[in-house]
Image (cartoon, rainbow, N blue to C red):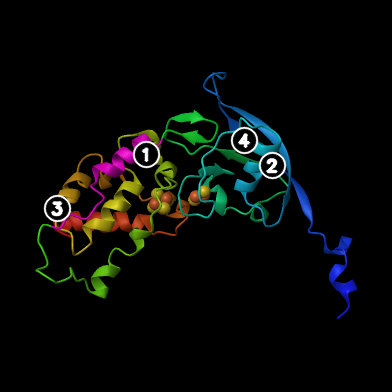
Amino acid sequence: MSTATLDAAPSDADAIESFTVTLIIRRFDPDADDEPRWQDFDVEMFATDRILDALHKIKWEQDGSLTFRRSCAHGICGSDAMRINGRNRLACKTLIKDLDISKPIYVEAIKGLPLEKDLIVDMEPFFASYREVQPFLQARTMPGAGKERVQSVVDRARFDDTTKCILCAACTSSCPVFWTDGQYFGPAAIVNAHRFIFDSRDDEAKVRLDILGGKDGVWRCRTTFNCTEACPRGIQVTQAIAEVKSALMRGTA
Ligand code: SF4
Ligand code: FES
């Protein structure tokens, strides 16, 4: 084998093409700003880059004060939900080439939760609703010595979809009822209640149904489907809410 082939430097034809994209980011520094303001950044990106890569590039090369949350960078931790061109998405799951790069890309914090800084909101009201629906297994009976708590495939399938939630808040913060009235539990809390209400091993479905049947529960939902469209995990959020409503009408899961 010729070593010349192995040692050859990449030619211009092999170079991966880059492009310049403009991000317009809604900034807010509570120590300096009375109101949020929009700021433009031009960044050199590649087709495989995501919005999270662009934010990193801006932070590392242009403005270290740009503030946003991220952790896993692979759509699992749920920490980088933001509004990108007016739609709730995970920055780490949004390829820049899938957006219209002939125009600037607008990036801002999710709505309906208190803005803390740049792309970061206070998630505490979101997690308070989550905690309120008791999102953990509560089994009052023991399966018997040496036995497992068995569940049929059909019973497991009833809540399979809602096990996928990563608590990113993309659904709740895209809900117009949640925007106008922060008291509503919101889609994510209902999804996580659904996960246990329909689990045949759990004995406290009634408690959760009572919570969600109250004035701030599922009946506030106006079936706009924003939540389902926003969910990066493809969870049928509106359907889950409808199933909880049906269980309430029946009086049982
Ligand atoms: S249901 Fe989907 S959009 Fe809502 S918090 Fe869970 S993963 Fe995020
Ligand atoms: S950084 Fe973890 S979901 Fe995007």
Q: Is residue 164 above or below residue 24?
A: below
Of callouts 2 and 1, the N-terminal one? 2
Judged from the image, the secondary structure of the residue bearing numbered disc 4 is strand
Of callouts 4 and 1, the N-terminal one? 4
Judged from the image, the secondary structure of the residue bearing numbered disc 1 is helix
Judged from the image, the secondary structure of the residue bearing numbered disc 3 is helix
Report the magenta residues as a range. Answer: 123-139
Q: Amino acid at mark 4?
A: Ile
Q: Nearer the viewer, residue 243 or 224?
A: 243
The residue labelled by disc 2 is 104
Q: Position of residue 1 (x, y in %)?
A: 86, 81
Q: Is residue 111 above or below residue 199?
A: above
The residue labelled by disc 1 is 178
Of callouts 4 and 2, the N-terminal one? 4
Residues at badges 4 and 2 in contact (C-beta under 8 Å)? no
Residue, x 59% and y 40% (percent of image)? Answer: 107
Q: Position of residue 240 (x, y in %)?
A: 31, 57
The residue labelled by disc 3 is 206
Residues at badges 2 and 3 in contact (C-beta under 8 Å)? no
Q: Position of residue 146 (x, y in %)?
A: 13, 71
The residue labelled by disc 4 is 25
Q: Is residue 123 left or right of residue 214?
A: right
Find out whether residue 130 is within the magenta segment.
Answer: yes
Disc number lying in front (4 or 2):
4
